Amino acid sequence: MSTPRVAVLAVASPAGEVGGAERLFSGLAGALRAQGLDAEVVAAVSDEADFTRIKGSYLRFWDLDLTGFDGVISAKAPSYLARHPNHVCYLMHTMRVFYDMFEVERPHPTEEDLAQRAEVHRLDALALRPPRIRRLFTIGEEVRQRLIASLGLDATVLRHPTTLAGLAPSGAPGRHLLMPGRLHRWKRVDLAIRAMRHVPGDVELLVTGTGEDEATLRALAADDPRIRFLGRVEEAELARLYVEALAVLFVPLREDLGLVTLEAYRCARPVITCADSGEPARVVRDGVTGFVTPPDPAALGAAIGRLAADPALAARLGEAGRLETETITWANVAGTLAAALAPGFARGVA
């Protein structure tokens, strides 16, 4: 009896960036192997520099030869264009610049912009509809609602955990505020910097990561010595920063899932997010596992100040977050997706 072969389709960036998507690809492949399947990550580059290259990326996945596999799991646009008779999609997100971020990035769209968005929606709707896709899952409710609103497609929500090692409660009081991730305008690090102007005392905000907005953000924070930019850090160092944090700030705009929230809770550290931050605002329970504030510097600063002044409160909220997210496991994700490919796949039987 042969072991089923499953391809996990990975979308690689031309710059070779590593982030939440790469954690999903590797974590899912490893979890499928633990199910007894022969899982392999199959990657192709997706270039979103302009619309011509975007169309080329769609074609690149359309042309993938996957005939040697018994099942295929796609996740990130445009990998779901891949052709296979046994195809399940575990959707991270479509190309957001043509969806929820269209008005943000193109406040005064041209006719060409509108035509491009319509073309992407048409292709995505055709690619994601059954029977072409056996089952459609999303990594969070935010992505599900986006699909319903934009394409009229529904899906099953299935959150996944992180693959970052070294995350565990320390039992020690936290030392600093942590804000990990890309330095990109959608992550709204500028909001956190402005919020620190409303935070008394000497609590530090440590910002990790790099990105296109780094110079602007450093300039914005230049007059506050409590804000430190650490740049790209190794995974072991990032885990240490989580473990030693007082609280974690995560205030993106309409985030798909946000592993930052789940990574913080693995360490029993509370999360402060915003009401319009998407999935993090659904995961964080205001006053129970962290704080959900308006996207306003003063409101955010007040929440930070409460935790900075009361480490015992921070510890209680963080522990509540850890307990509430314990059921988000790779075993559950892999078992659910494997069963969606074929009932026998969940046990690794062809």
Image (tube, rainbow, N blue to C red):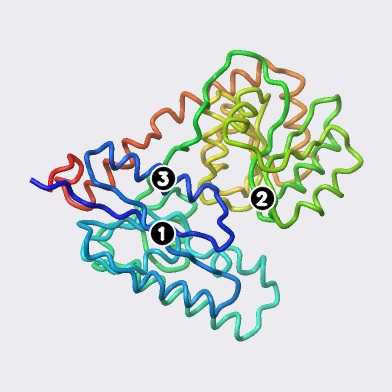
What is the quadrant of residue 144 in the picture? Answer: bottom left
- Report crowding for label 1: few under 14, some 14 to 19, many 20 or more residues within 10 A (C-alpha): some
What is the quadrant of residue 224 in the picture? Answer: top right
Query: On the image, numbered disc 2 is attached to which residue?
Result: 187
Amino acid carrying mark 2 in the image: Lys
In whole angstroms, how far apart are the C-alphas of marks 3 and 1?
Answer: 11 Å
Front of the two marks 3 and 2? 3
Front of the two marks 2 and 1? 1
Query: On the image, numbered disc 3 is attached to which residue?
Result: 26
Sequence order check, earlier mark of 2 and 1:
1
Amino acid carrying mark 3 in the image: Ser
Residue 43: assigned label: 1
Residue 304: assigned label: none
Residue at the farthest left position: 1
Q: Is residue 106 above or below residue 173?
A: below
Please state, as top left, top right, bottom left or bottom right, where the N terminus lies in the image.
top left
What is the quadrant of residue 116 in the picture? Answer: bottom right
Q: Is residue 34 above or below residue 316?
A: below
Residue 76 rendering spot, x and y as whole percentages: 44, 59
257 displayed left or right of 90:
right
Sequence order check, earlier mark of 3 and 1:
3
In whole angstroms, how far apart are the C-alphas of marks 2 and 1?
Answer: 26 Å
Amino acid carrying mark 1 in the image: Ala
Q: Tell me the residue at 58%/30% (across/down).
A: 236
Q: Is residue 73 above or below residue 149?
A: above
Residue 290 rendering spot, x and y as whole percentages: 61, 30
